[in-house]
Amino acid sequence: MRKVANGSLSVEEAEQRLKILAIEEVAGILKLDVGREVRKSVPEIILSEYKSADQLELAIKGLLEARGRAIASRLREDQFEVVKKFERDYDVVLSASRRVAVIKRRDYRAPKHGGRVGIVAAGTADLPIADEVRLLVEELGCEAVSIHDVGVAGLHRTLEAAKRLLEVDVDVVVAIAGMEGALPSVMASVLDVPVIGLPTSLGYGLGGSGIAALLSMLQSCSPGLVVVNIDKAMRAAVAAALIANRVARFRGSSGK
Amino acid sequence: MRKVANGSLSVEEAEQRLKILAIEEVAGILKLDVGREVRKSVPEIILSEYKSADQLELAIKGLLEARGRAIASRLREDQFEVVKKFERDYDVVLSASRRVAVIKRRDYRAPKHGGRVGIVAAGTADLPIADEVRLLVEELGCEAVSIHDVGVAGLHRTLEAAKRLLEVDVDVVVAIAGMEGALPSVMASVLDVPVIGLPTSLGYGLGGSGIAALLSMLQSCSPGLVVVNIDKAMRAAVAAALIANRVARFRGSSGK
Amino acid sequence: MRKVANGSLSVEEAEQRLKILAIEEVAGILKLDVGREVRKSVPEIILSEYKSADQLELAIKGLLEARGRAIASRLREDQFEVVKKFERDYDVVLSASRRVAVIKRRDYRAPKHGGRVGIVAAGTADLPIADEVRLLVEELGCEAVSIHDVGVAGLHRTLEAAKRLLEVDVDVVVAIAGMEGALPSVMASVLDVPVIGLPTSLGYGLGGSGIAALLSMLQSCSPGLVVVNIDKAMRAAVAAALIANRVARFRGSSGK
Amino acid sequence: MRKVANGSLSVEEAEQRLKILAIEEVAGILKLDVGREVRKSVPEIILSEYKSADQLELAIKGLLEARGRAIASRLREDQFEVVKKFERDYDVVLSASRRVAVIKRRDYRAPKHGGRVGIVAAGTADLPIADEVRLLVEELGCEAVSIHDVGVAGLHRTLEAAKRLLEVDVDVVVAIAGMEGALPSVMASVLDVPVIGLPTSLGYGLGGSGIAALLSMLQSCSPGLVVVNIDKAMRAAVAAALIANRVARFRGSSGK
Amino acid sequence: MRKVANGSLSVEEAEQRLKILAIEEVAGILKLDVGREVRKSVPEIILSEYKSADQLELAIKGLLEARGRAIASRLREDQFEVVKKFERDYDVVLSASRRVAVIKRRDYRAPKHGGRVGIVAAGTADLPIADEVRLLVEELGCEAVSIHDVGVAGLHRTLEAAKRLLEVDVDVVVAIAGMEGALPSVMASVLDVPVIGLPTSLGYGLGGSGIAALLSMLQSCSPGLVVVNIDKAMRAAVAAALIANRVARFRGSSGK
Amino acid sequence: MRKVANGSLSVEEAEQRLKILAIEEVAGILKLDVGREVRKSVPEIILSEYKSADQLELAIKGLLEARGRAIASRLREDQFEVVKKFERDYDVVLSASRRVAVIKRRDYRAPKHGGRVGIVAAGTADLPIADEVRLLVEELGCEAVSIHDVGVAGLHRTLEAAKRLLEVDVDVVVAIAGMEGALPSVMASVLDVPVIGLPTSLGYGLGGSGIAALLSMLQSCSPGLVVVNIDKAMRAAVAAALIANRVARFRGSSGK
Amino acid sequence: MRKVANGSLSVEEAEQRLKILAIEEVAGILKLDVGREVRKSVPEIILSEYKSADQLELAIKGLLEARGRAIASRLREDQFEVVKKFERDYDVVLSASRRVAVIKRRDYRAPKHGGRVGIVAAGTADLPIADEVRLLVEELGCEAVSIHDVGVAGLHRTLEAAKRLLEVDVDVVVAIAGMEGALPSVMASVLDVPVIGLPTSLGYGLGGSGIAALLSMLQSCSPGLVVVNIDKAMRAAVAAALIANRVARFRGSSGK
Amino acid sequence: MRKVANGSLSVEEAEQRLKILAIEEVAGILKLDVGREVRKSVPEIILSEYKSADQLELAIKGLLEARGRAIASRLREDQFEVVKKFERDYDVVLSASRRVAVIKRRDYRAPKHGGRVGIVAAGTADLPIADEVRLLVEELGCEAVSIHDVGVAGLHRTLEAAKRLLEVDVDVVVAIAGMEGALPSVMASVLDVPVIGLPTSLGYGLGGSGIAALLSMLQSCSPGLVVVNIDKAMRAAVAAALIANRVARFRGSSGK
């Protein structure tokens, strides 16, 4: 400032410096990585799909070193080799779809936070996504209760599934369906816990690829239904785990 | 042809005449109005919406003279006066929505073809459309069985409705729903008669105005579900009547 | 309840149990598989497209054991081998498109319910879908009358087809068209039986892949036209069979 | 340039000047208004819709002075007063829809170029647009042959219209339809002159407001069909007049 | 069954009866209204928008009698009078937008379940929706913490809001934003509780009316973000309350 | 009729027969193939894309026998072999894109109707489509004037092209462009003959694949511009030929 | 931390406090309002559209006190009264559209940063938006050069405008167009300064309301063209001013 | 003209000649290639994607001869060989994505105009596009400052990037992001230079492939943000270079 006064600093330079100063302090603070500390209950999950083989391998190694475990979602078929390489030195767990992989040090023990997540899938075609959700919520410290093939075309199976979820007293339900996507609506109309609708990219013709499923979930009249985008298993799993684990935090070891 | 030969007719004129001749004969035949004779079981229904008051009045008068009855659908609020004028000399029947009107000579007796049409509506907001369907199928000679407020948010009511339709042994069901439009899917999964899904222009946000309802009906996995466009009460009613009355034609007076 | 009173049951446990109790009874009842008894005239049809080879084979075997016949629709090219395996021990019938397969015990006799379904296709490109509809309605117990290449670009062929359908006195017509999809409209304007419009995924540019065809069927002014989604041969076939067989049930063996 | 050499002109100034020079010459030439001379057979038509009352009045006055005639299309209801003012001193001709107005000096005589334009409209709701096309092509020097209510729902009327157009031997046809928009397709499949499809903003539900009509015209298989946007009466009229008048230019007064 | 055996019952009648019997039992059970008992923590909320004045009044009266409180959402301007009538005999509470109304007996005491819901709104235009969410979650037994005008255009305010929500230790956050809808993404990236993104129908041009906001929430990379449809205050509020109250149920009176 | 009177014919049979009779006569007439005679100036063009190799070969053979020439458009890469087979016995002419093929008897002489069609293409990527249009209009008896690489990014080339088209005095112009599709607008604003806008499926991002090009042509303010769907070379060529040949019919051999 | 050690602080409390601490520091820093200092060359502009009259008045007053000037954009018709009130004590300047208002203390002097912004509008209907851009860039300290009615339908006027902009040597051009939106493409192909395309909500039919204009700008091949959303005058003006004023900052008072 | 008078020239010929004359002069002028001189600061860049291998090679050779450097963007995988051929005789520089190639004479020295362009990319998947922008702006004579992996999910990194850009005092920023595309909004809200939002085709489900990113950038409230279409690295680079180099032109060699 004085520099400005005595002329050794142009007004423009002064102005520029003030700007930098302000940002600098903010950035300095933020560098402490507020986010990471704050959100420690949700580990970083690698979105593999748009990464090269090298980038993916690097990311896995980095997480293994820092945390002892790496979770990779949306693996492309051709990235599978990258994951296989780790099998020699690490435990590698795959979802049925082989699109989600967990690589861990052999002595790694995943946390058990105690949340309970119900997972219901409408048809056999929804199974790969459902299994991804299961693997993810388990790695996030929850207990998963999976029930399959309970689409509304077989109403009694739908209701049996609802009964089972009530018995287990899950904290949240992830309801998975493609085509017309009616399952989450019916689940949310019967259960009194939040339901996360997860549309899958099934169906052809107008409204296909999960569009009709997503839109009908967004339009649903059933109370307590929230939605994630088509095929976003990871997104549904993380939200479910956040809900369930927060409940579990207060439920404690004494159970209900 | 000879004219061409002897030069008194240019090639182009000859060609032109041949074209006209061919069309002329076709048109001559068609003038017999094949269509009308063929389709007599479905009376003409006036689509009022895009007509001026004068055009509407003229159309009604024309049908009253020719048939003793005029049916007008999609009446605009401001066309209501046109219909009221006929009350002095004719019987005027209106749907609850006042968008469908039947004007008939006092001695007119609508045919009774004996078809049975079930009409189920998901919510109270679907009632106006449902009543339009009812009035139309009745005028088309069917018996209507209407059940309201049976959306899947109250599953037991949905199933009670299905039971009632089975008892009456309807020939076809018109299932009406807006928002996520799940009712027709559930009905078609439970009943063994054809179900006509009729989406209504309810709902806001993405997929609103009946879009999600229509798409989820188009994507439905339930067997036997066919669809008409959003709010097309008349279209659903005519298709239902065609189905039901054809069944009734063979069922005869002996009933089931 | 008494437990609540004497304190041995917490309020929360009581509440939870009541919920389960209610669902349990419903589920108990529903387990009788109301649906299957109710809808027995429509056999289950396997949607192959989203199944793995193993899942498909299992499904076929299951149906063969339970019913003596398995119908699979939307077969992917790579699933064809699964079907071929059954040829040694069973009769295997394929649609021209090889996307619909019927596998039956050699002594299986399909029911003859007596319904009559007209099938008209606009162009040669619509033939594969048309043949799928034919095979399916025949397996559903109907008599099929197929007429091809009758798009409105050749109006006289369109009308000849209409004439033939009237002579045979079909109970319902499946009208198949891609591109601008005008055939179902014209058919429905000429015939007095319900017409099911089945758009095919033909056409390129804006409105291509069957979109314009579907939309123009949804917008059609012709009475009695209902619609299924693009390429949904199975859906059209089942709806047609439900209509035709219900008529046939009352027509009896005496014919018209 | 020399200025650059002797330093009295900076390089940047020189560069800037060269740019201006080049554009200037082009602009200078173009100022001769190539366009107007070139396109004189099509008079300027005022698009009223987005103009204020003052802007519209000014535009009309300008054309009346320069040409003795002003044509205004897409008049808003509230702009009608502007047009009425001219009635005292000029001849004012309106389309039935009152959305197209022609204001001319009492002694103005529109050219007669001799083109023949057929105009067919599917339904009564298409009449206002059809009459706008008629008025415009007449003002553009053509003879108009208008035939209404010839939608494909009444096929014989459609063919009668085609016959009449062949008899008159029109040079081009404007085919107008809303809803599913099948009329232009059928016309183009029957006639051997170019057909301009003009979709109208009729119809509700998915594909409504003319969307399905436009898309099905774009997808049509009929040879010789071209399209303009929804409700664009003026655009269809000008294209039709350009075609017809060019034919007429060579047909001469001797007729065919 | 015996009737079938001894011939006094036709096969068709028998079949029909079996169908009815099965449905009847289900319906009988379901009539107990499983749903209501099961979901008692969420009271019925009237969707006023598509109801007539009479229907709305009836619905309010019904709920007042049965429960002592009626909640109505999406009130149209013209329905406001209906609500006002109740002011003489009941307490009437309105949201700032006057689109949500709570009518209660003067002695009615809303439950306090103890859930804590954070509500953040991006701009002043989002306030009406935000206040609807607040009123609803309070009536659903939660404590609401509302913070406004914290859009990402003012990042420091966004972070201050996050800090406040952490201090209060809310169980779930409803993040409200129109236009580009970035607030929920940023909130979910900073907080470790589930965030419900609620897009509002703000913004014009492509992606306006909340479309871009909804899509960007659906596409967001931030963990723990789920979504409801545009303007669906009620849906967001109920989901938030279900989550928060389930946490509170285990947190008990002892607080954290 | 008499049969009805004396009772040997039921009313239903009579009715059915009347229907058939009416259609039969129409169909009988139409069988003369009105269409073909009427439209002889436009030969049938095979849409190869959706045909099997066998269907295509059959279609080509049929046309070669009947007319001595077969034109096939939209050839798929894998259909090229079918066309090659004919090279031994016939002349085979291909467009640069190898998607349009003309197969003719060695002594076949295409008609020369004398129409003049201008063809302008915006970029090098539009060349394949442009050459298809050229080949087709030539086969349809027109003289083609093709000018390439005249997109509005090089305005002087655009105007030079316009000049050349005026010198040749073409009867109609096909203007081809992808991306933003501005060329047809500029051409139509400069020329006084009808311009057919042909959008190509170029461009990526929002509005890509020809969508923006098509929409901007549909929205264009330039008089005399009509449009065909994206990539529809055949449709544009046939319409252009119909226009040009009709002009030529009156222009006669004397030229202008 | 010590509290944790000695047990007086639970782990959960500790964790919670750490989170708050981190956010607190960040928020504390940010409170210095980095943004405002940093971006001082762009004053806050009130988006009036979604504000109530009270909110708007408050916002204006606030800015007047703090800065001596308030700029309000997107004024609704009914908000005009709010602005008028200020006329007694302040200078009020309005854009021609009356949708942008500048209210200033009588002694307020807007800064002159020296940037030069060219503004070109395609048609008379684009004038209101063009004038909003002009008023805004002037208030942002730029010199505006506005040229109207230079759509590509009159190419010579388009080029004359380009010439003028080169002569003035503007730093950036805002090119405004609705319908097919070709003006910005042509401008960007002729000028060597950045061009900001501003589509306006003109045009009807498919691609209307500015959609085709926006898409064709996004698809344009012309170098140097960037885009803002439909009707976003304020957004275009601010971007133009940022560009022009940065240039001016270095150009200094000495001009070029 | 005299010819007209003395009859040796028909009126039509005269008219035709006048048209040509006018265009001819314009074209003559334009042939000077106004555009090229005017826009010399932006070299031609080859859009490789839609070119054949031969066309591409020709284009590269042409530019190498004329300018000593050829820049090719949007190279397809299969076009890479074409570029490799030039390596023997020329310097070939590739972007990391291998989709942008610069081929130059070994003695070619790219201009240094002195503009400073900041490039920020949200995620690792955005790197290929970011590197294309870098290579292009460098070839256009700018200094590029690239910062990666600064998506808003890691807010402190976002702000650090902003700080760095302020320190370097860039003239313009290209902000690159897929998915929900929030980075450009945040950058524009923090910086006081124009920001060009460049959405990338990342993301799946509704709003995927860059749609949500583009829409949210178009809807953004942040001042100074303009947009280019999805994946349009070249378009963003050219606009950025035009802005930066214009600033640099006045900044001169003396720096700031």
Image (cartoon, coloured by chain):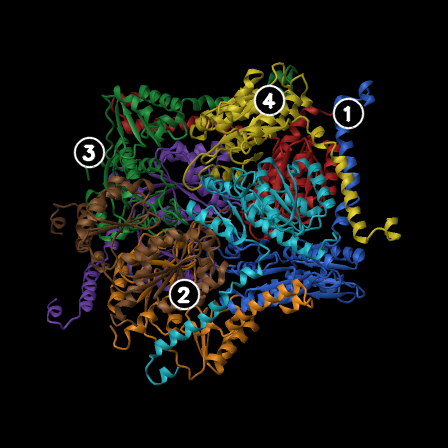
Chain colours: A cyan, B red, C yellow, D purple, E blue, F green, G orange, H brown
State the residue position of label 3: F253
> What secondary structure is found at the residue carrying circle 2?
loop
State the separation of the CA atoms marked 1 and 4.
Answer: 25 Å
Q: Is residue H34 above or below residue G29?
A: above
Tell me whether the residue at label 1 lies in contact with that at label 4, contact meaning CB atoms closer than 8 angstroms: no
As drawn, the label of residue C139 is 4
Tell me whether the residue at label 1 lies in contact with that at label 2, contact meaning CB atoms closer than 8 angstroms: no
- In front: mark 1 or mark 4? 4
Q: What residue appears at the point 30 percent right and 68 percent down from the top-left corner? A: H247
State the separation of the CA atoms marked 3 and 1.
Answer: 84 Å
Amino acid at pointer 4: Glu
Tell me whether the residue at label 3 lies in contact with that at label 1, contact meaning CB atoms closer than 8 angstroms: no
Amino acid at pointer 2: Gly
Residues at discs 1 and 2 both on one chain: no
Amino acid at pointer 3: Ser
Residue E118 spot, x, y in % from top left: 63, 63
Residue E146 spot, x, y in % from top left: 63, 66
Residues at discs 4 and 2 both on one chain: no
Q: Is residue G15 above or below residue B204?
A: below
> What secondary structure is found at the residue carrying circle 3?
loop
Tell me whether the residue at label 4 lies in contact with that at label 2, contact meaning CB atoms closer than 8 angstroms: no
State the separation of the CA atoms marked 1 and 2.
Answer: 76 Å
State the residue position of label 1: E14
Q: Between C13 and D69, which is closer to the camera in this rendering?
A: C13
State the residue position of label 2: H224
Residue A64 spot, x, y in % from top left: 51, 50
